[in-house]
Amino acid sequence: MSVETHPEPSATDASPAELIRLDKVSKRFGANTVLDQLDFSVRPGKHVTLIGPSGSGKTTILRLLMTLTKPDEGTITLDGQPLFPAPEKQVREVRKKIGMVFQQFNLFPNMSVLRNITEAPVQVLGLSRDEAEARARELLEMVGLADKCTARPTQLSGGQQQRVAIARALAMRPQVLLLDEVTSALDPELVAGVLDLLRDIARSTDITMLCVTHEMGFARDISDQVLMFDGGRVIESGTPEKIFSDPEQERTREFLGAVL
Ligand code: ADP
């Protein structure tokens, strides 16, 4: 079986071949090999969803890209620049191109909503506070929370907190948005609103998205490519139509049977 993890650009496609590239990436925690010689790449503007059973290494990939953890072997590049291995100074520069939204929101509890969004653009990108606030207000408008600038995260619902976290990630104008099970911690009635917001972002921006989710309807809607993980490897990849309607691997069928 061939798993298409480094797609070739077509002759007519002028965009660079890949924005994210992992080559032979392995990650172990003690005796547990979580990622095993993993290869894959994502072209600019594409939306790629990682699916697979719990513990198959999906979150670890996002954490590697966010440089929250390091591989034991292999290379990772973003936009042609090394993220691993690379000197710390360069890693800090390259990482500015990546934003991440976490399952548990991870907002700063002691800061207002506005401050949560402006802090990194001011500290990391060097924007003036006025510029950062103007950008934050636009983003809060976009996520439907223009009236919550002065609220603290604890005064908001989970869905609202996640919208703030999405605005915070976008405030850095990243080229890549990493989404790690962003609706898993939400009450069921709040899930649809957050997914609709992400669908809008996927439709209306050219941001590259790498997404771990158990929301298969959402994955089907937004993905250009779906990668099925098992045991730290991509066992199957393809368009959502192919993976969800006509998977080749028994393991993929089993997994989808359990979650759909
Ligand atoms: P998934 O996102 O597919 O559910 P993860 O990437 O979160 O999987 O985890 C893959 C494996 O790595 C799991 O067995 C998990 O227990 C292990 N793991 C992840 N992070 C750590 C860590 N910091 N220390 C030890 N083991 C970890």
Image (tube, rainbow, N blue to C red):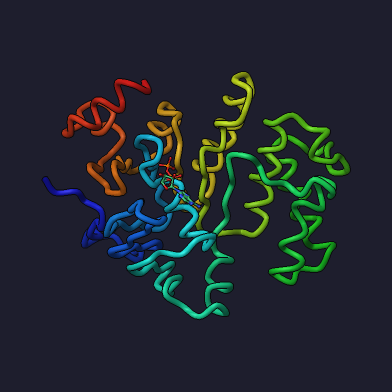
> Is 93 in front, or is 142?
93
Q: Looking at the image, which residue is at 56% across and 37% down?
A: 182
Q: Quarter holding the N terminus?
A: top left
Above or below, 90 against 150 in this view is below
Looking at the image, the residue that sits furthest to the right is 150
Q: Looking at the image, which residue is at 23% across and 42% down?
A: 236
Q: Looking at the image, which residue is at 46% across and 59% down?
A: 64
Above or below, 86 against 186 in this view is below
Relative image position of residue 168 (x, y in whole percent): 68, 50
> For this view, does 180 lie left or right of residue 121?
left
Relative image position of residue 200 (x, y in whole percent): 55, 37
Looking at the image, the residue that sits furthest to the left is 1
The answer to which quarter of the image holds residue 192 is: top right
> Is 87 in front, or is 41?
87
The answer to which quarter of the image holds residue 215 is: top left
> For this view, does 188 lie left or right of residue 228?
right
The answer to which quarter of the image holds residue 11 is: bottom left
Relative image position of residue 247 (x, y in whole percent): 20, 31
